[in-house]
Amino acid sequence: MEPFLSNEKAQRDYQLVIAAREKGDQRAYADLMRFYREPIYLMLLRMTHSPVDADDLTIETFGKAFCQLSTYTPQNTFATWLFSIASNNGIDFIRRRHLQLVSLSSISVSEDNETYEYPIASADPTPEEDLIIRQRDNLVRQLVDRLPPRYKRIVSLRYFDEMSYEEIATKLNIPLGTVKIQLRRARMLLAEIIKNHPHSL
């Protein structure tokens, strides 16, 4: 017996989740990513104020969601579940980078007349949160490990060692423009890895 879901979009998403996690349907994964990539990106852009960071965090969000798809239950809609992962991902990023949190008690994104709102916690992470953050970072590292060596190195310098574009260019002795191009290409490859091989992460 299928669960009761409140609207057609929620029912559509649930059918895609079932097809993705139980049948390994690559099109279902791609459709979920296509439907939610832009609103997830916009929410993360509001949190980070950085198009580059928001793009990276969007890819990470889908990587984590697809890794954890077996844990999704339809007590909440897929959209709510996914936005919660994205929100936590953004908060983790802000804490790691020691950035100023957005001056809001919550952050919300409207999509198809639905509003998803999540509290922004300003306290330091608890030991349990630290463990969760490390587990999520490990998932991201698994994704990065699948990149070709030159992209893996530059992504590691940028996101694990937290080096600036200029520092990477100096360390690798390559032009600044090449750093930006290679990072853009690496993000595209990560998106393809998530879309085409999510069940093997």
Image: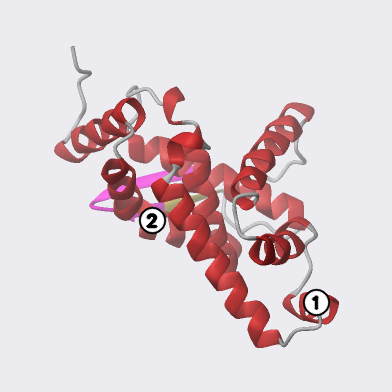
The residue drawn where x is 40% and y is 48% is 196
Q: Residue furthest top?
A: 1
Measured as percent of width and height from the top left, residue 159 is found at: 71, 59
Q: For the residue marked with disc 2, what is the amino acid?
A: Arg
Q: For the residue marked with disc 1, what is the amino acid?
A: Leu
- Nearer the observer, 110 or 181: 181
| Residue wearing tag 1 | 172
The residue drawn where x is 60% and y is 56% is 147
- State whether residue 50 appears in this view: no
- Residue 34: numbered disc: none
Check residue 117 for magenta coloring. yes
From the image, state whether disc 2 or disc 1 is nearer to you. 1
Tell me which segment is drawn in magenta. Answer: 109-119
Q: In the image, 17: left or right of 12?
A: right
Determine whether the residue tagged by mark 1 lies in a helix, strand or loop. helix
Measured as percent of width and height from the top left, residue 45 is found at: 51, 64
- Nearer the observer, 120 or 143: 143
Image quarter for residue 158?
Answer: bottom right
Q: Residues within 10 Å of mark 2 (few under 14, many from 20)?
A: some
Q: Residues within 10 Å of mark 1 (few under 14, many from 20)?
A: few
Q: Are marks 2 and 1 in contact (CB under 8 Å)?
A: no
| Residue wearing tag 2 | 37
The residue drawn where x is 73% and y is 59% is 156
Determine whether the residue tagged by mark 2 lies in a helix, strand or loop. helix
Q: Main secondary structure of the magenta part?
A: strand
Measured as percent of width and height from the top left, residue 131 is found at: 74, 30
- Nearer the observer, 125 or 194: 194
Comes first in the chain, label 2 or label 1: 2
Measured as percent of width and height from the top left, residue 85 is found at: 51, 40
Real-space CA distance between mark 2 and mark 1, rounded to the nearest whole angstrom: 32 Å
